[in-house]
Amino acid sequence: MKLRLRTLLEKNPMSVKEVEIILQHTIKDHVILIDDSRCFDGVNGYPKLEELRNLIERSRRGYEFSAWNDVIRIHPKKCVQSEF
C-alpha cells in the first residue's frame, strides 16, 4: 500500500494525503466525508475517484465507499445509515 499511496501523493498532494493521515490514525472507525466528488477525475491535482476507492478498499477492509450528491462517503460498514 505504501508504494501505491506514495505514487498517488506525488500526483495529488492534498486530498490523498489528508485521507492517508486519517487512515493511519489509531482510531479505526472514522467517518470521512469529502465534498466536490465531481472533481475527482484525475485532472488539476485530483486523483480519479476509482483510485481513491481502490486505496480505501486495500487499506480498510470493512469500509464502505460511495459518492452521492457530490460528496464522497467513507465509513465502516457497521455505521447506521439514514436516508438523505
Image: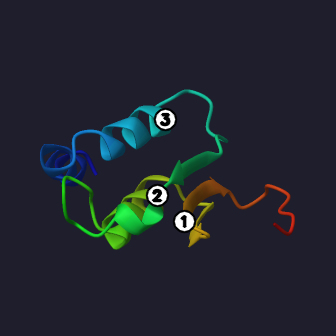
Label 1 sits on residue? 70
Tell which circle, 3 or 1, labels the residue nearer the N-terminal end: 3
Q: In which quarter of the image is residue 70?
A: bottom right
Query: Does the image show residue 41?
Result: yes
How far apart are the alpha carbons under marks 2 and 1? Answer: 5 Å
Q: Is residue 38 left or right of residue 3?
A: right
Report x, y in % for residue 30. 64, 40
Q: Is mark 3 on a helix, strand or loop?
A: helix
Q: Which amino acid does label 1 sit on?
A: Asp
Report x, y in % for residue 62. 62, 61
Residue visible at 20% across and 44% down? 9
Q: Do the residues labelled 2 and 1 touch (CB within 8 Å)?
A: yes
Q: Is residue 3 left or right of residue 17?
A: left
Tell which circle, 2 or 1, labels the residue nearer the N-terminal end: 2
Q: Nearer the viewer, residue 11 or 5?
A: 11
Check the image and report above or below for 2 versus 38: above
The quarter of the picture where the C terminus appears is: bottom right
> Within 10 Å of the Cα at label 2, are there few (<14), some (14-19), or many (20+) other Cα atoms?
few
Label 2 sits on residue? 36
